[in-house]
Image (cartoon, rainbow, N blue to C red):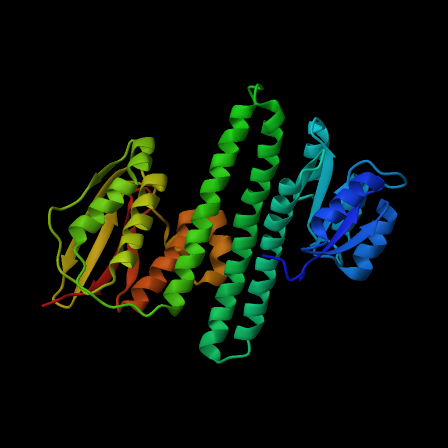
Amino acid sequence: MNNSKQNTLLIVEDEPVNLNILISYLRDQYNVLVARDGKEALVQANNLKPDLILMDVRMPKLDGFETCRRLKNDRETSDIPVVFMTSLTDTEDKVKGFEVGAVDYITKPIQYKEVLARISAQLGLRNLQVILEQQKLAIGQKNKELQIQNMELNAFAQIVVNDLKKPLVRQAGFTGVLKTELANTESLNFLQEIEQSRREMVDVVDDMVLLINIRTQEVVVEAPDMVPIVAGVRYKLTNLINEYKGTVIAPASWPIVWGYSPWIETIWEIYITNALRYGGKPPKIELGSDYDGEQVKFWVRDNGRGFTEAQQKQLFTPMSDIVKIETTLGKGYGLKLSIVRLIIEKSGGTVGLKSQAGRGSTFYFTLPAIG
């Protein structure tokens, strides 16, 4: 990925043997800079702005922890990812490293594949941020419609950085600790954290790809068969339904509409997932439709807490307000509902809900009827 030497690494290591090993591993793929202690690292980081810093924990003059802390407190260097090098048995050092701002660590004795894998993962994340910023600037130079997209992509970039990078960092940290502490009962908690982080990461990536497709993809409108679509979504959500002890009731047949099957499946999945997670205890969910001669309204009714009028105005919000909405109402009501709105607007329909605090909610979307 980086064989064109587009990325620059700063290696901070005072031990000549380890330093020479790292240089031999990395010089063919990256531009390599060297610092022998923490003070020299601070100077080079400010002057040369490397893409990543690979730093030993134990060093004279200024140790790795304090060096990292100073880097993160300096606005000029705070966004440079720091990867620590530490002994395989120094669990306390690994935890402290994350506390002072490191994104990952490499265990000693240093292994070639581990070094390349961890550096590549962190540079991939950093390069993604750079690409998103470049796209934002390019979009800002176009017409008014693209300027709106610029605001949305900017907001989405924040979500990607916050929701994708954090789970990746957590995975790296917890996985490394488990290598030496699998016999510890606390390992089970670490494994659960890793699995949750993985799910969050996959979910965010899927949303990112879907959002890009909605904005750019030209689709062929068809007459989707709702029966297998809804059945497929219910099967996909089997584990979630069982987890929440939920009940999902659907009709045996549906009206025929114009639409695009993969997008419609996504909408059903979002609506039903939200109804399970935020519905009653246990959730009772009913699916249905209404036909007015031109449009068909498909709906998902739950027995949850409902929404006040003020809260309802925040739903299906533009993406520029997503972070705020997800903080107050839950993740499914931010980016997810914005994606629903974009899909349906591009399909010629509308979205909305009917709700009353304490009496559940009915989320709906409409599509053009056939015949």
Residue that appears at 81% across and 51% down: 34
In the displayed orientation, state which residue is furthest to the bottom.
143
Residue 224 in the image: x percent, y percent? 18, 59
Residue 353 in the image: x percent, y percent? 29, 55
In the displayed orientation, state which residue is furthest to the left.
371
Q: Quadrant of the C terminus?
A: bottom left
Viewer-proximal residue, 110 or 82? Answer: 110
Viewer-proximal residue, 3 or 270? Answer: 3
Residue 95 in the image: x percent, y percent? 68, 33
Q: Does 194 sit left or right of 309 as displayed?
A: right
Instruction: Using the rendered view, name the quadrant where residue 4 is placed.
Output: bottom right
Residue that appears at 63% across and 53% down: 123
Say if residue 220 shows up in the picture.
Answer: yes
Q: Does 196 sit left or right of 337 as displayed?
A: right
Q: Quadrant of the N terminus?
A: bottom right
Q: Does 33 sit left or right of 228 as displayed?
A: right
Residue that appears at 49% across and 62% down: 320
Instruction: Using the rendered view, name the quadrant where residue 291 is placed.
Output: bottom left
Viewer-proximal residue, 66 or 250? Answer: 66
Residue that appears at 57% across and 48% down: 165
Residue 349 higher or lower than 265, as above or below: below
Instruction: Using the rendered view, name the quadrant where residue 8 is placed.
Output: bottom right
Residue 192 higher or lower than 77, as above or below: above
Residue 147 higher or lower than 100, as above or below: below
Viewer-proximal residue, 128 or 320? Answer: 128
Residue 277 in the image: x percent, y percent? 36, 40
Say if residue 329 shows up in the picture.
Answer: no
Q: How many marks?
A: 0
